[in-house]
Amino acid sequence: MKICIIGGRLQGTEACYLARACGMKSILIDIDSSVPAGGLADDFVSGDLVKEEPEVIRAFKEADIILPANENDELLAKIVELSERFGKPLAFDPEAYEITKSKIKSDKLFKDHDIPCPKYYPEGKAPYVVKPSDGSGSTGVRKLETAEESAEYFKHSQPGDIIQEYLEGPSYSIEVIGKPGNYRTYTVTEVHVDKGYDCHMITSPVKLPEAKLKRFQEIAVRLAELVQLKGIMDVEVIDDGEDLKVLEIDARIPSQTPIAVLKSSGMNLLKELSDITLCGEFREPNTAAKGEERVFCAYENYKKEGGVITSEGEHIMRNAGPLKYRENFLGSMETMTDYAGEDRDFRGIFINWGEDKDEVMKWRDTLLHS
């Protein structure tokens, strides 16, 4: 099976790893020849798909299934068009993505259907957080500490800004895959954010009380049904002590969480997505359905600058050089890094797992103190 992954940064890196893990041959396409996933794919073709450069079209047509791994509207439209023209199965739902890429549209969905979410300014109380309408992750996120600061910002806010109360509590993510009438949810992951509100570590599994886990799964499936999802979507929530409040949804292949899900439960979300896309049904039992996880996993992003190693948000990986996969390297069980020597700066993804959290945290501490 050959999968064509279009986009070689965060999502593309995740997809190339998952493809290798389930025995798929990956064909990566990106206009930038130095993207991180370029060192992980089985076949990397650098070129402009929008311009339909011959070598890129050849690679596209060679694949059995197409996976967009980017958030470029022009490129996504071209991928949809080419998939239809060449009769290639597309592991992506453009209609659902159109809703989830906009925080205005998705937040309206939450409000219209009584999905629990943070209150909007001026409801609730300070502090508030400002998010741009488009895009995912932490880009453009800002915290407003006081009611006065929030009121002043609101006077000059942009039409697309989302201003919501800032809630304290752990953040969790869950993936849902399927088509209307047939959805699955998977292992819950915890999202650990840095001072810039960017995710710097994913841990899995999360031992939620049975009632709370069921509540989270039900919210995810309901959201999938509301957008009539045909593919994959991740749902991020915050547990503020009262309820699980939905922060955002994204109907596209996520970064970071799928690898943690794979390590902790054995479920490969790319394999699941491919099965539902190609066969219209799931082909394997869901070992993550009832919390049957095998191990605890920690997925982190590190960089070395000036001889100092630090753990930072995933933004540091966007501009990493081509990554190389290695096992038992730099104090970690698995790494994907642009490491080029002891005297050079590097960026990388570090993955460790074990029977319990204490064991894994001791292992990962060897990296920080090596």
Image (cartoon, rainbow, N blue to C red):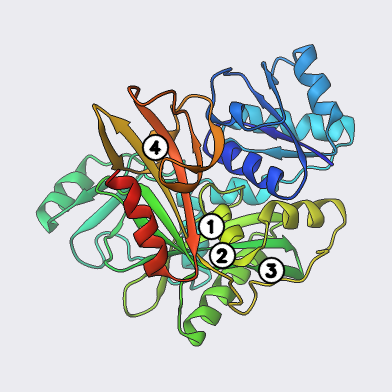
Q: Earlier in the sequence, mark 4 or mark 3?
A: 3
Q: Nearer the viewer, residue 90 or 356?
A: 356
Q: CA distance from mark 4 to mark 3?
A: 29 Å
Task: Report the residue marked by disc 1.
Answer: 260
In the image: residue 183, left or right of residue 249: right
Q: Earlier in the sequence, mark 3 or mark 2?
A: 3
Q: Nearer the viewer, residue 133 or 29?
A: 29
What is the three-letter code of the residue carrying label 3?
Answer: Arg
* Residue depicted at x 77% and y 46%: 23
Q: Residues within 10 Å of mark 1 (few under 14, many from 20)?
A: many
Task: Report the residue marked by disc 2.
Answer: 264
Expressed as whole percent of the image width and height from the top left, the position of residue 68 reads: 67, 37
Q: Nearer the viewer, residue 150 or 237?
A: 237
Assign a secondary structure to mark 2: helix
**Quarter of image, res 358:** bottom left
Q: Are marks 2 and 1 in contact (CB under 8 Å)?
A: yes
Q: CA distance from mark 3 to mark 2?
A: 17 Å
Identify the image quadrant of the C terminus.
top left
* Residue depicted at x 13% and y 58%: 147
Q: Earlier in the sequence, mark 1 or mark 3?
A: 3
What is the three-letter code of the residue carrying label 2?
Answer: Ser
Q: Residues within 10 Å of mark 3 (few under 14, many from 20)?
A: some
Q: CA distance from mark 2 to mark 1?
A: 6 Å
Expressed as whole percent of the image width and height from the top left, the position of residue 346 reads: 38, 29
Q: Where 192 falls versus 312 (above or below)?
A: below
Task: Report the residue marked by disc 3.
Answer: 184
What is the three-letter code of the residue carrying label 1?
Answer: Ala
Task: Report the residue marked by disc 4.
Answer: 315
Expressed as whole percent of the image width and height from the top left, the position of residue 319 reads: 43, 27
